[in-house]
Image (cartoon, rainbow, N blue to C red):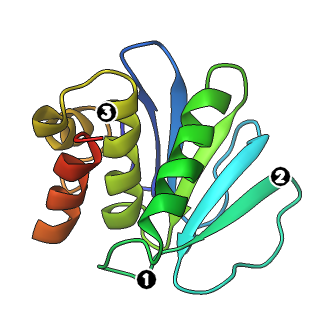
Amino acid sequence: MWDPEGTGVIALPSGRLVRGRGLRRPLPDGPEPTFAVHLLGRRPPPEAWESRWLRWPDFRLPADREEARSVLAEVWQRAAADRVEVACGGGRGRTGTALACLAVLDGVPADEAVAFVRRHYHPGAVETPWQRRFVRRFGER
């Protein structure tokens, strides 16, 4: 569940764990991720661990939806064995949307994925109507 420090670990139904984080906050205590995806409008600085950048402006949708699908599928696969983190500026809108898409990949019905993430990660996750629609449509493929 989310904590006031801007981080939270969500357990997907399969048992995969993914940490969501707001990059504007300090790195939380605990083990560093082995793989991270940054959902930002511009390229982030390099990390000490393997990371990927998915161009995704604040309050919007990914610039390339096919790339987003591919990157999120990689996150889901790697979460089976790696410490994976998904992060945006604040850790709620874009991060929540990505976590809801991961829940869909993990078997949560698309029309229930936002509620799942709000219940298990943060009650304010997935901030905009178009982010909610993105999650529903993510499940259509």
**Which picture quadrant has residue 14?**
top left
Where does the image place residue 6, in percent across and percent down from the top left? 45, 58
Pointer 1: residues within 10 angstroms few (<14), some, or many (20+)?
Answer: some
Q: Farthest top residue?
A: 14
47 on left or right of 107: right
Where does the image place residue 2, in percent across and percent down from the top left? 37, 44
- Please name whichever residue, 96 or 76, is drawn nearer the observer in this view of the structure: 76
In percent of the image, x 61 and y 29: which residue is there?
77
Could you say whether the residue bearing mark 2 is in a helix, strand or loop?
A: strand
Could you say whether the residue bearing mark 3 is in a helix, strand or loop?
A: helix
89 on left or right of 112: right
Three-letter code for the amino acid on which mark 3 is drawn:
Val
Q: Is residue 108 above or below residue 76?
A: above
Q: Farthest right residue?
A: 48
- Please name whichever residue, 77 or 126, is drawn nearer the observer in this view of the structure: 77
Mark 3 or 1, nearer chain start: 1
Pointer 3: residues within 10 angstroms few (<14), some, or many (20+)?
Answer: many
- Please name whichever residue, 51 or 135, is drawn nearer the observer in this view of the structure: 135
The residue wearing badge 1 is 57
In percent of the image, x 62 and y 40: which residue is there?
74
The residue wearing badge 3 is 104
Quarter holding the N terminus is: top left
The residue wearing badge 2 is 50
Mark 3 or 2, nearer chain start: 2
